[in-house]
Image: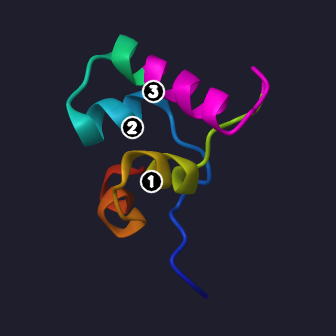
Amino acid sequence: MGNFPRRLCIRSKDICNITGYSMKKAREIINDIKVFHKKEKHQIVTVHEFSKYMGIPVEQIEPFIN
């Protein structure tokens, strides 16, 4: 069926686990991705958007997504 992560959205905690950044930096990354994709405040950031923005293949992110 394709390479889909278990969850569609990515959370700040996931970004902390993947990158080792602080929670504050992880929230900044989510906000940067929202600006980059012209999303509104209430809209979510997907795993695929994070993957593309950070240049990390989705396959390497999947083990960190619970």
User: Of callouts 1 and 3, which one flags the residue occurring earlier in the amino acid sequence?
Assistant: 3
The residue nearer to you, when weighing 6 against 32, is: 32
Q: Position of residue 21 (x, y in %)?
A: 25, 24
C-alpha gap between disc 3 and disc 2: 12 Å
- Mark 3 or mark 2, whichever is nearer to me: 3
The numbered dot on residue 51 is: 1
- Mark 2 or mark 1, whichever is nearer to me: 1
Callout 2 crowding tier (Cα within 10 Å): few <14, some 14–19, many ≥20:
some
> Is residue 1 magenta-colored?
no
Q: Position of residue 3 (x, y in %)?
A: 51, 77
What residue appears at the point 79 percent right and 25 percent down from the top-left corner?
40
**Amino acid bearing label 2:** Asp
**Amino acid bearing label 1:** Ser
Callout 3 crowding tier (Cα within 10 Å): few <14, some 14–19, many ≥20:
some
What residue appears at the point 25 percent right and 37 percent down from the top-left corner?
19
The quadrant of the rendering that contains the N terminus is bottom right
Helix, strand or loop under label 2: helix
Q: Determine the main secondary structure of the stretch shown in magenta.
A: helix
Name the residue tied to disc 3: 29
Residue span colored magenta: 27-42
What residue appears at the point 34 percent right and 56 percent down from the top-left corner?
56
Q: Do the residues labelled 2 and 1 touch (CB within 8 Å)?
A: no
27 in relation to 48, above or below: above
User: Of callouts 3 and 2, which one flags the residue occurring earlier in the amino acid sequence?
Assistant: 2
What residue appears at the point 64 percent right and 30 percent down from the top-left corner?
34
Residue 33 falls in image quadrant: top right
Name the residue tied to disc 2: 14
61 in relation to 44, above or below: below
Q: Where is residue 66 in the image (x, y as percent from the top left)?
A: 42, 50
Helix, strand or loop under label 1: helix
